[in-house]
Image (spheres, grey):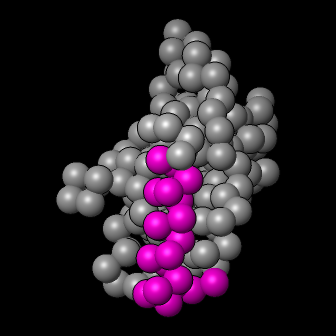
């Protein structure tokens, strides 16, 4: 996608968000997403979760970097989808960064949906965020088990 196309897509998405009266938290995370980016997927301390919703086309990649004590020292995401999906990813990355893997495993979609005041038709976005966290944690644990062998 060209830079011009990306800007047009962003402007259109923002226009839609405002026209259907999304909560200010969704708009804030969409306009100012936190922790966008990528970590080295080959790093044994990085877990990567990629999830998607075929019904709407949203795809989320969430990565975590974990230190030796089990603390998530960094979290990055890339999401292709609607404003609610981007906001859910951004919020999830904020919530787990600096926390333990045990804490991250307990983050649930209903907490994300409540914080963002997602409408019922957008709950699948918070579900994707929860699934992405779980997938990243599973990938990290798989890598750690492989090292121990």
Residue 148, magenta (yes or no): no
User: Looking at this view, is 27 or 116 the one in front?
Assistant: 27
Q: Residue 131 vs residue 117: left or right?
A: left
Query: Residue at the location (66% across, 58% down)?
Result: 33
User: Looking at this view, is 88 or 68 the one in front?
Assistant: 88
Residue 5: tell me if it is visible. Answer: yes
Stretch of the chain drawn in magenta = 5-24
Quarter of the picture holding the N terminus: top left
Query: Residue at the location (57% across, 86% down)?
Result: 23
Position in image of residue 147 (x %, y %): 58, 13
Vertical order, 13 against 6 (above or below)? below
Looking at the image, the residue that sits furthest to the front is 4
Position in image of residue 72 (x %, y %): 72, 43
Q: How many marks?
A: 0
Position in image of residue 136 (x %, y %): 51, 40
The quadrant where residue 96 appears: bottom right
Query: Residue at the location (53% across, 83% down)?
Result: 18
């Amino acid at each position: 996608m060209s830079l011009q196309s990306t800007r047009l897509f962003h402007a259109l998405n923002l226009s839609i968000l405002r026209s259907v009266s999304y909560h200010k938290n969704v708009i804030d995370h969409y306009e100012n997403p936190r922790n966008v980016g990528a970590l080295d997927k080959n790093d044994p301390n990085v877990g990567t979760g990629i999830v998607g919703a075929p019904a709407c086309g949203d795809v989320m990649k969430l990565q975590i970097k974990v230190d030796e004590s089990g603390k998530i020292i960094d979290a990055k995401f890339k999401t292709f989808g609607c404003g609610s999906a981007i906001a859910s990813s951004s919020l999830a990355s904020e919530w787990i960064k600096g926390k333990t893997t045990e804490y991250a495993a307990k983050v649930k979609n209903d907490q994300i949906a409540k914080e963002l005041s997602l409408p019922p038709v957008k709950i699948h976005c918070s579900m994707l965020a929860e699934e992405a966290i779980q997938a990243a944690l599973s990938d990290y644990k798989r890598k750690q088990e492989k090292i121990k062998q």
